[in-house]
Amino acid sequence: MKKMMGFIGLLSIVLTFAFFKEKGDSMENKIEGLPVVGILQLTSHPALDIIYEGIVDALNDEGFVDGETIEIDFQNAQGDQSNLNSMSTRFVNKNASLMIGIATPSAQALANSSKEIPIILGAVTDPKGAGLVKNNEKPGGNITGVSDLTPIKEQFNLIKQILPNAKNIGILYSSSEDNSIVQAKQAIEIAESMGYETTVSTVSSTNDVSQVSSSLVNQVDAVWVPTDNTIASAMSTLVAAADENNIPVFPAVDTMVEEGGLATVGLNQYELGILTGKMAATVLKGENKPQTMPIQYLQKGEIIINLEKATELGIAIPENILEKIKNQ
């Protein structure tokens, strides 16, 4: 009797194992059969993280749900170029149906990995200038997407309204990011056309931010920074140096204001992600091809003010600006 019970118990274990193995194999095959969407993010900081959230939400809204209708393979390179290259190759080896690059270096790595797989740009300031497309209106290849070109003129107008007596504006950016170089050149031209002196400083990595920003804030009345992943990753370091000298920072990105900047006219990073996801969805549905889809832009920036920082720095925000914020 004991032998019989032991046999039944063993048989039960074997059958149970076989059931779950078959179920697991079935689920694995289901995932393996789904179209792969590779998403490559340069590094972790709030602006890029929120863009990724917007992309996923937009794909979901269009019926492309991870694990159900697509497989999202999300890779974060943590700012490492070798990671960008190997992760791009990973997507190609998985025969991805589409790839999305969040930030210019990610998009460039994807572009180098394939000339055939559709690539959607998420937050690339100047796709043509970065060598990703032939023309921003008619890309002509396997790449299109969304630009995060920031409204620099409006940002400097905001600086003039908040700090009417400011004379010298510091411009801090990363010399290793093509998108930052483009914005910095525009910012210098705009600032000088408005009568400002400019003091320009560059960093090559986050390790430089502390020393460079500490020197810069001793020479200027305010600091402007572009949509820059290196600066964004070390925003707290910049803010700490600026706060010590009671100098306001005007970043180009809304999330950087939340991290201690004073104000900006910025693009909503989540909406950039939504627009990127929607463009990706039309390609996945076969409704569009990258070569014929113009680069897309958000049409309107929003005024964002860090009132707590303004109080901390003893800066009064003009009533007309506060009224505009209420009516946005």
Image: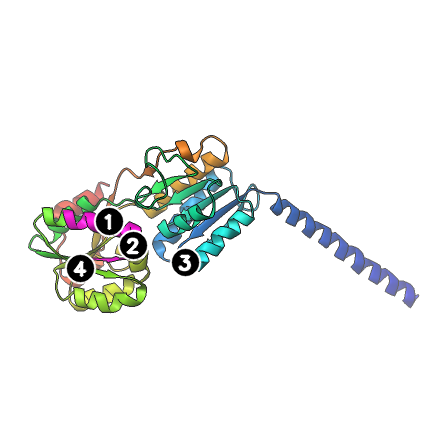
Q: Which residue is mark 2?
A: 228
Q: Are marks 4 and 1 in contact (CB under 8 Å)?
A: no
Q: Position of residue 311 (x, y in %)?
A: 17, 60
Q: Are marks 1 and 3 in contact (CB under 8 Å)?
A: no
| Mark 3–mark 4 distance (CA, rounded to whole Å) | 32 Å
- Look at label 3 and name its amino acid: Gln
- Look at label 4 and name its amino acid: Pro
- Residue 137 quadrant: top left
For the stretch drawn in magenta, the main secondary structure is helix
* Residue 199 tag number: none
* Residue 248 tag number: 4
Q: Which residue is mark 3?
A: 81
Residue lying at 25% horizontally and 42% vertically, measured from the top left: 301
Quarter holding the N terminus is: bottom right
Image vertical order of residue 7 relative to residue 146, above or below: below
Q: Are marks 2 and 1 in contact (CB under 8 Å)?
A: yes
Precedes in sequence: disc 2 or disc 4 = 2
Precedes in sequence: disc 2 or disc 1 = 1
Image vertical order of residue 195 relative to residue 295, above or below: below
- Look at label 1 and name its amino acid: Gln
Precedes in sequence: disc 3 or disc 2 = 3
Precedes in sequence: disc 4 or disc 1 = 1
